[in-house]
Image: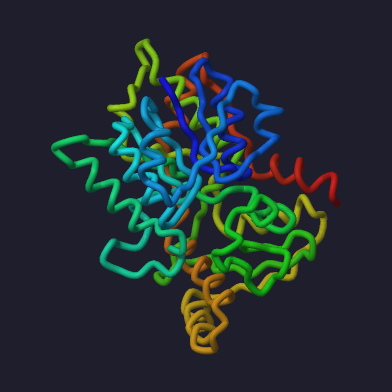
Amino acid sequence: MRIAIAGGGSFAYILAQEISKSAHPVLILTRQPHPEFEEYLPSCQLALVDFQNVEELHYVLRGVDLLISTISNNEQLNLIDAARRARVRCFVPSEFEGPLSHRPQANSTDPLDNRGSRAALDLLESWSQSRSHRMNYTVFSCGVFMERFAYGGLQPWGIGTQLGLMGPMPTSDYLVNIEQGTADVVERDAQGRTAYVAMTSMYDVARFVAAAVELTGAGALAVPLERWPREWRVRGDFMAVGQVVRVCEVVRGVQFSITRRSYQEAEAWANENQRAGDVATYLYYQRLLQTADGRYCIRSTNLNELVNQSERTAFQPMKFREWLEQVWGPVL
């Protein structure tokens, strides 16, 4: 099976690092040279491409079975078009977040969709139903990347830098500022139910993707690409929003200054910032509201269990506290 990864950022590198451990050849499509790929991942092949040129992408993708995207917007739409023309068997879009069923409905506005997610999923669904050149697609839903809680959030990883995620806590990306010992949270939804969030390290997400690839082979547990479900659900940890803050306090060794907002208060605050033209703060609170609504809540998984049934692929993803201690221990 030939595998291609679109994008040359940090997450693409981590995916390539894990998948290249298998016997499957890996092709990386990137806009510009990446000497680090060539030096540290010599088994991977690099192809410089123009993601605006569908014909060029079509040519490069010939013979590829599985295409994993880490790009977005029009570039990803072009990639989908080229993949179908090249008869790619399965497309994995750049949708590594909460489960599909917990996102805003297709007929409603999603203020957090700055990456063209809805357009990409609609196009993939259309091609998956096509009578000619049908192309399967699968989303890896993982909740929130734990790296969102690293120093500077996801920005040092080059993820989310254009999404307006930075809110009122300048070095924090989501819920807490571990360095400063502060938190701004919505712990319950509009009906008063406890809000939960699933979290997975991006390194473990890559390991899950690589494990799914390994499971396409022969054997009783084999799941060929054509039988991959619409969604592989994975998680490293799962906890209430309030528990996330408490674990951060324990690892930091201090009591945080916590701003707890009701759902209605956060909604009013988001609307006020939208009217004032403060887009960054508006989007920040929209993410808190959608967290309370269950956008990143993965109560049950379907890939964790399957992976651990095979000796070839079994592994235990990191729990949130373990990840925090590894990442923040040296800093604090």
Residue farthest bottom in this picture:
276
Number of marks in picture: 0
In-front residue for pair 247/201:
201
- The residue that appears at 50% across and 42% down in the rendered structure is 49
Judge from the rendering whether residue 123 lies leftward or rightward of residue 205; answer left or right.
left
Residue 48, position as x, y percentages in the image:
54, 39
- The quadrant holding residue 249 is bottom right
Judge from the rendering whether residue 167 lies leftward or rightward of residue 309; answer left or right.
right
Judge from the rendering whether residue 104 lies leftward or rightward of residue 180; answer left or right.
left
In-front residue for pair 83/113:
83
The vertical placement of 127 against 317, above or below, is: below
Residue 207, position as x, y percentages in the image:
55, 30
In-front residue for pair 7/147:
7
- The residue that appears at 81% across and 60% down in the rendered structure is 254
- The residue that appears at 41% across and 41% down in the rendered structure is 56
Tell me the quarter of the image containing the N terminus. top left
Residue farthest left in this picture:
131
Residue 178, position as x, y percentages in the image:
75, 59
Residue farthest top in this picture:
219
Residue 149, position as x, y percentages in the image:
67, 54
Colour pattern of the rendering: rainbow
- The residue that appears at 42% across and 72% down in the rendered structure is 190
